[in-house]
Image: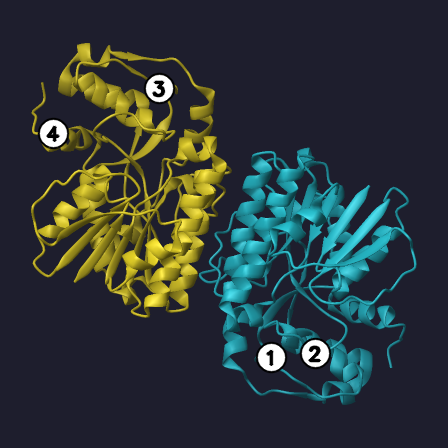
Chain colours: A yellow, B cyan
């Protein structure tokens, strides 16, 4: 099986590739990224390719002969809000280019599209399902919602076999803060664990809907492996997550790493960030996802444990 | 006030222009259409322009200096299903070009976008509202849903002052059948009234959600005139309609024009048409629209009356 991953240089793309390499049925994995990717495995099935998917030729070259395409590449929420045209070009146009490339290949590849809880916004019901209307309150959310419609229509027409997975906010992301409005969600756990300060731009009462990278990778693999019949015409799945307030996250951090760690967090509000993140729902009914065999984290503490174990560490 | 109407050569565009010409506050109306439009008024405020809006230059020329833009141009449902790329180019790309043109003008024009009940599809709740998820089961519906997201995000960002009006199926359209999957909805009334045969490709029990052209024109004018504050962040309105079965439509026709007229209808099913039209909802809660001052037809008989009076006729 020939697999391609866009945004493959990101930490999720690399973790997904590592997970897929353990499957002997996979003969080739191409990681495509707009940025340079440092090699991280000497498995000969792995190829790394620099590609700007806004270019139809690059999209076509990547999709050529592929059985499964994971489309993770995106301009994140904060950046798509700050740079509207860039967000449209990458989050909408490149998704379309890739779908067109997959269609042109005439093989009807499996197309796994990572969407986001950011497609939702107020007014929100108490509990969100796949039958809840999307009202994005960010350009990122609007672009992801358009991408969803593209994947669904391309699937309905038989051009691709699409799966739209709506991710909760991923926490704890490794590395440095990024331009996502939700970047702080990882920072307020990661930086204190590393002995560094972090700022929380929202209040302690704000509820979030979170997933570990580990669960995301498992769910991406599950999404690709599901038979199309199991999904039926509804190609969209809200992935499972954990509902937690900022305050509860910090209490959990204190239990794992002590009050000193939790004390490294400051609370200077940032209205731009708060407006976007507070528009996202935090409570979902994920019955559909669970029935389809997607996995969920076992409470917020397991997200901290996933981070520590991935970094090869134990709780301090 | 300077107004432009795309798809202005269509019967709705022409009727809208006529209605707007009665408003002395309007200084100019430009009707843009991809096809030749026969002049229908010698009012000097009216200009007719041939324009292919997929061309960014044409879109920009049209939007230049405009205060209100009615974007009615579209490839209809049956044609967008048969010619996927054409539907994408007109229903998605031209909508985006026009929004970008309006944004470039830096005047934040009012942008009235005609969407459709076709954005919805199964699974459907008993009654559809603005909080119901869209699950389009046609490329036309998917393209309109993407257009809605564009108009909403361009509005949120302050590029345009958008209003998305989701139209019920319009009945009775004058003229000849077109490539819309719903074309028969007008044909089974119009052709018998004109002494001609018509075929109904769906069963008598199918429920439809209909509006007269008269109500659409009144609601387009209302949509443009509404203060943006009245809409708030939710730019989408499901316009009022009439719920009626095909059987009830034919009974109504028989009451107006006799059983001879109703006898001109044949029932040869067409699965392609049925699949699209049966995916649309027929029952809506339009409390939001009514609260905003949109109008509704007074039962299906008034749709027949609107047609006859517009054609300068009385019931035979």
Question: Distance between the Cα atoms at labels 1 and 4?
Answer: 65 Å
- The residue at the point 49 percent across, 60 percent down is B136
Looking at the image, which is closer to me, A225 or A55? A55
- Which numbered mark, 1 or 4, is in the foreground of this view? 4
- The residue at the point 37 percent across, 64 percent down is A155
Q: Indicate the position of residue B257 as horizontal and vertical percent values.
A: 81, 82
Label 4 packing within 10 angstroms: few (<14), some (14-19), many (20+): few
**Label at residue A204:** 3
Q: Which residue is mark 4?
A: A311
Question: Distance between the Cα atoms at labels 4 and 3?
Answer: 27 Å
Q: Are marks 4 and 3 on the same chain?
A: yes
Q: Which residue is mark 2?
A: B187
Q: Which residue is mark 1?
A: B204
Looking at the image, which is closer to me, A77 or B216? A77
- Which numbered mark, 2 or 1, is in the foreground of this view? 2
Question: Distance between the Cα atoms at labels 3 and 1?
Answer: 58 Å
Judge from the rendering whether residue B93 lies leftward or rightward of residue B192; answer left or right. left
């Amino acid at each position: 099986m020939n697999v391609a991953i866009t945004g493959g240089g990101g930490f999720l793309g690399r973790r997904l590739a590592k997970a897929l390499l353990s499957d002997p049925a996979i003969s080739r994995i191409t990681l495509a990224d707009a940025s340079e990717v440092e090699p991280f495995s000497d498995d000969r099935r792995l190829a790394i390719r620099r590609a700007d998917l806004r270019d139809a030729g690059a999209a076509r070259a990547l999709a050529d002969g592929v059985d499964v395409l994971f489309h993770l590449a995106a301009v994140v929420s904060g950046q798509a809000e700050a740079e509207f045209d860039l967000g449209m070009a990458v989050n909408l146009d490149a998704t379309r280019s890739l779908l067109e490339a997959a269609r042109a290949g005439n093989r009807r590849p499996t197309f796994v599209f990572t969407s986001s809880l950011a497609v939702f916004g107020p007014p929100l019901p108490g509990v969100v399902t796949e039958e809840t209307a999307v009202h994005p309150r960010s350009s990122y959310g609007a672009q992801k919602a358009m991408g969803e419609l593209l994947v669904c229509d391309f699937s309905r027409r038989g051009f691709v076999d699409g799966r739209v997975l709506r991710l909760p906010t991923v926490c704890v992301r490794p590395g440095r803060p990024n331009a996502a409005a939700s970047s702080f969600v990882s920072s307020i756990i990661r930086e204190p664990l590393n002995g560094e300060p972090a700022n929380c731009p929202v209040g302690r009462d704000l509820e979030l809907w979170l997933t570990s990278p580990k669960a995301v990778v498992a769910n991406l693999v599950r999404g690709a492996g599901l038979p199309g019949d199991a999904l039926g015409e509804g190609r969209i799945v809200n992935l499972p997550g954990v509902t937690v307030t900022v305050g509860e996250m910090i209490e959990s951090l204190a239990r794992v790493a002590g009050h000193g760690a939790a004390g490294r967090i400051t609370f200077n509000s940032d209205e731009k960030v708060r407006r976007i993140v507070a528009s996202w729902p935090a409570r979902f009914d994920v019955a559909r996802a669970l029935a389809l065999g997607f996995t969920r984290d076992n409470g917020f503490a397991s997200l901290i444990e996933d981070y520590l174990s991935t970094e090869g560490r134990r709780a301090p």
